[in-house]
Amino acid sequence: MADAAAPAHAPWKPRFSPWLITISVMLATSMEVLDTSIANVALPHIAGSLSVSPDEATWVLTSYLVSNAIILSASAWLSSWFGRKRYLAFSVALFVVASALCGMAQTLPQLIVARVLQGIGGGGLQPLAQAIMLECFPPEERGVAMAAYGMGIVVMPIIGPTLGGWITDNFSWRWVFYINLPIGIAGLLMQEVFVEDPPWIAKMKALTIDYLGFGLMAIGVGLLQLILDKGQEADWFGSTWICWSAAISLAALAGFVLWELRHEHPILNLRLLKNRNFGTATFLMASLGAVLYGSTALLPIFMQTLLGYTALQSGLAMTPRGVGSFFSMLVVGRIVKKVDNRGLMLGGFLGLGAFTWLLSLLSMDITPANIAWPLVASGFCMGFIFVPLTTLSVATLRQDQIQQASGLYSLLRNLGASVGISMIIAMQTRDAQVHQAMLVSHVTPYDYSLHAALQSLGGAVHGLAGLPAAGMIYMQVLRQAALLSYLDAFRWMAVACVLVCPLALVFVKGRPGAAAHVALE
């Protein structure tokens, strides 16, 4: 960000306590991080309330992630153009207004537009909060400040599913968004009182922005996400508009890459991907985001639609993954400087693949514990991936390249998450149709098992008297087809984790401790 130049100026101390400033900015930042997970368990309720299918309801997640990622790439320019305090206030205000619009939405398109606005408002909050906290604390206390920042970033996604489930069950899914209003308004008022721009901010000239590059990226990424979200419903390339959208998206993304490689001040420095460590790390982080967010979106739908869990129960069932991640961060933080990071990452991906595979062995007769302990273990493995991956990603970059790398790294992480959600949900929906066709082929008057099932239900194979029992049999077919499709999705995610394992050996060692910026953004 433009604010990275701040340390070069004379020492400056804010008028108010740095901890009051920290609370002010972390209220808004925690609210934004919470929104990445709190809506997951409410998706079935949103789908039912707005009369859409569960796979269409996942737009609520992907639209937010995509708009958040796109605006993240322009946050440095926006901060220097408007002034950091003004841009922070604008972002929080937009996020609060968009949250209110999400709660008031009466149709899915209205909700998606509101979520896009929410993503635009939330895109700059994390880098802004980090820059403000780094500048208001003296150098010797910045480690403590970043620890507080990191804990907030980790804890919010952990409590998000449980809080979202409790709110949805006891009030309405709309309050999942309304809860942002008091938090955001409190943060906005505190920021107005306690946060101030350092004297050098006013003297800084706005950075030039790569308008063409930004436009090409927004068009290419936006259309790609639209194709992934609507492709299954529109029969993919059997639809004319899908074909046109794919062509425009491909052309825009190709133009974006060529333009960014030639531009003197690109909005994203794609040349950094030539670096062996950084290029490999961004691919692995995008893959990890796809598996993490894909499974986080899929599991609550599975538990609520097939197992009959309430939103709160499914939220509680998802919490163990966050708890596992929290404790693994503590463990890895102590050993990351003593053990080869490549070995930690390799073990993390293998463990994540193995425990994700266990989710593919679930059935309709499981208890919450059958879901909880694989999630705890897989969450624990994620710490062994995230910390070494972040460290190695910048280990061979120059110090002046780290800030640019952090923006690109965060962008691809969010894009990997949004693309992963769309692809996994699309695969699950298509596989459900395949399994349904396969199972229905066995439901014939000549099948002995069908005769036995109908007789046990009090029906007959022929005549109107058998219709109620036959309907129950068909509902069982649909449930079994859906179950098999969910299990297939978990298998694909497990296989993906194993396939990327060899890439952990591609990294080369570099100077330790270079990942401070990237790790926390």
Image (cartoon, helix red, strand yellow):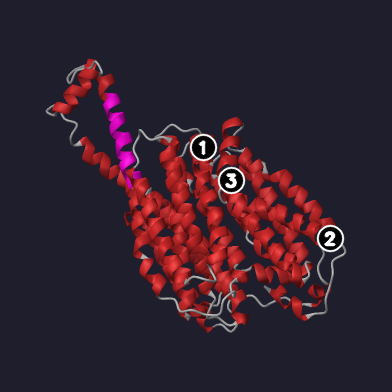
> Can see residue 252?
no
What amino acid is labelled 2 in the image? Ser
**Could you tell me which residue is drawn at 44 percent across and 37 percent down?**
368
Q: State left or right for residue 159 relative to residue 428.
A: right
Q: Secondary structure beneath disc 3? A: helix
> Can see residue 196?
yes
The residue at which mark 2 appears reads as 17
Whole-number angstrom distance, CA of label 2 to CA of label 1: 46 Å
Q: Position of residue 137 (x, y in %)?
A: 77, 67
Of label 3 and label 2, which has the lower sequence position? 2
Whole-number angstrom distance, CA of label 3 to CA of label 2: 29 Å
**Could you tell me which residue is drawn at 66 percent across and 53 percent down?**
30
What amino acid is labelled 3 in the image? Gly
Mark 2: few/some/many CA within 10 Å (<14, 14-19, 20+)? few
Magenta-colored stretch includes residue 479: yes
Q: Secondary structure beneath disc 1? A: loop
- Depicted 77 relative to depicted 435: above or below: below
The residue at which mark 1 appears reads as 50
The residue at which mark 3 appears reads as 160
The range drawn in magenta is 471-487
